[in-house]
Image (tube, grey):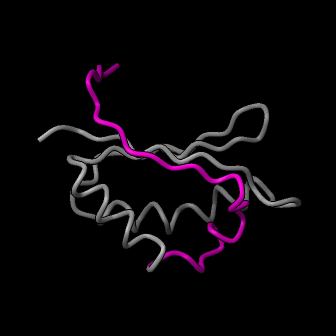
Amino acid sequence: MSNVVEIVSFKLIEGANAEKFVNSAEPINAWVQRQKGYQSRSLSVDKDGVWTDIVFWDSIETAEIASQKFMESNGDTEFMKMIDPSTLKMGHSDVKLMKEA
């Protein structure tokens, strides 16, 4: 079994409040943490307003299962309503090297 990183990038819809968006991520975070294979998650934003949601999983299988269940469970949440779907990009990659701080 190898670790897998899920990387999702996107921009928020016009007029969305960043602080409200971060607060709306808390229920999503709780849901993600309950999924089999979950290891860690971070949510960041760059100077151009591109957000990056990074989740580490224990395998590609658990990552893909969680991804499939995500929209079913969270598609109508405030978190998802603030994301501009035309900017959304998502992918999974095998982790080849990971060092703890």
35 on left or right of 23:
left
1 on left or right of 45:
left
Q: Residue furthest right?
A: 15
Q: Quadrant of residue 68?
A: bottom left
Q: State the quadrant of the N terminus.
A: top left
Asked if 20 appears above or below 101 in the picture, the reply is below
Q: Quadrant of residue 17?
A: bottom right
- Percent position of residue 76, x then y: 60, 80
* Residue beneath the point at 55% across and 76% down: 75
- Percent position of residue 80, x then y: 62, 68
- Percent position of residue 90, x then y: 51, 50
* Residue beneath the point at 80% across and 60% down: 13
Q: Nearer the viewer, residue 10 or 79?
A: 10
Magenta-highlighted residues: 73-101
Q: Nearer the viewer, residue 89 or 7?
A: 89
Asked if 39 appears above or below 15 in the picture, the reply is above
Q: State the quadrant of the C terminus.
A: top left
Is residue 85 magenta-colored?
yes
Q: Quadrant of residue 95?
A: top left
How many numbered discs?
A: 0
Is residue 89 magenta-colored?
yes
